[in-house]
Image (cartoon, rainbow, N blue to C red):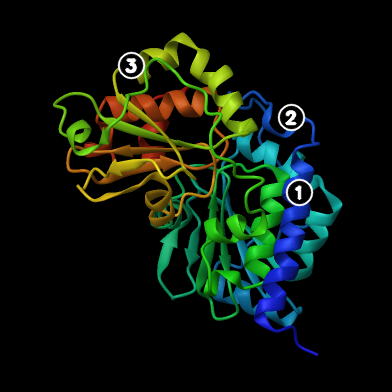
Amino acid sequence: MPIIPSIRIFISAALVYSLCHSAFAQNSDDLSFDDSILETPVDYPEWFRLSLGDLRDDLNSAINHGKIGIMVYYGQKNCPYCQKFFDTSLAAEDIKHTIRSHYDVIPIDIWGIDTIIDTDGTRYSERELSRHYKTNFTPSLIFYDRSGTAVFRLRGYHSPYQFRAALDYAIGVFYKSVSFRDYLDRAVPGMYFKEGGLIDRDFFARPPYDLTKFVTHPSKPLVVFFEQGECHACDLMHTQPLSNQKILTEIRKMQAVQLDMWANTEIITPKGDKTTARAWAHQLNIFHAPTLMFFDAGGDEIMRIDSVVKFYRLLGVLQYINSKAYITDPDYQDWRLKQRPTQ
């Protein structure tokens, strides 16, 4: 008997509740790693499938083997976040079994020169395809359904429990009815996402939060920290990279605002809309805490970091924004390649 949508949502919510609840008992190891560039290149898991050169053929092959689609992995050879993803999420037997049962994983090197045809028939190099999907941070994942539609994407490294939730969201086709943010909120209402308890810092602006006044500053760009209470990743960001003097020097060149992504704090957005922090985070589909969003003088988003971030990645992004390099180099990875060793 088919499971009706309301029951499916309840079952999935219960599953994600269990996954997220278990995160509180986990060791912090899945967030503790050095993000300096690796000396030894990352090896793909042996069960990844190299592309046939045409994602349509890759998709047909997956469907013929009983899969529901393909997952395209965007990485780079010396990426510590990619290695961490392989060592944690993809090393978990339940995650590996779930992926292999539902998807073929097609790896793409974001610096590669091989030709890849996307599911809509457009021909790219691997690098061009990576730019097309704005894979600013590796690893990035794009999930394609049976029709060849890119239905869900996940940027950067996420802890195994959140990656499990992302898999359940994609496999359960919940992207058709609810955002990933709302999916997580429904799964663990009032427990995982708690208001209050944010770590205050002297570089955060004080209310009232009229962000139109911040984006018009002639020299200081605006960064908004979306955080939440009882957030281990937020705590680590503040006690590790945000305690480093190089990072602090870059942050102090900006106007920084901290918002509780689940609070009803009144704000005026950079575009002049009166709303609340919670409503704005919902509108922006903020699901990861912390998420850092950067805005230009017109109030438009430049980029966001919505995954685990450590020292080198954060330093690179802050320097990219403060130097206004995004004006001449709109692709962060292209700019970053010129700035080694930061990433």
Residue at the image point whose x is 52% and y is 49% from the top: 287
Residue at the image point whose x is 30% and y is 42% from the top: 267
Residue at the limit of the structure toward the bottom, as seen here: 1
Vertical position of residue 188 compared to residue 159: above or below: below
Residue 61, horizontal then vertical, whole percent: 68, 77
Q: Indicate the quadrant where residue 225 lies.
A: top left
Say how many tags the image has. Answer: 3
Residue 45 appearing in the image: no
Position of residue 194 in the picture relative to residue 253 (left or right): right
Residue 38 appearing in the image: yes
Position of residue 83 in the picture relative to residue 341 (left or right): right
What secondary structure is marked by label 3?
loop
Front in this rendered view, residue 267 or 173? 267
Q: Pointer 1: what residue?
A: 90
Position of residue 113 in the picture relative to residue 42 (left or right): left
Amino acid at the residue labelled 1: Leu
What secondary structure is marked by label 2?
helix
Residue 83, horizontal then vertical, whole percent: 68, 37
Distance, label 1 to label 2, CA atoms, is 17 Å
| Residue 252 - label | 3
Residue at the image point whose x is 50% and y is 63% from the top: 116
Amino acid at the residue labelled 2: Ser
Q: Between tags 3 and 1, which lies in front?
A: 3
Vertical position of residue 64 compared to residue 257: above or below: below
| Residue 77 - label | none
Q: Pointer 2: what residue?
A: 28
Distance, label 3 to label 1, CA atoms, is 38 Å
Front in this rendered view, residue 172 or 200? 200
Mark 1 vs mark 2: which is more N-terminal?
2
Front in this rendered view, residue 187 or 166? 187
Residue 318, horizontal then vertical, whole percent: 37, 26
Amino acid at the residue labelled 3: Arg
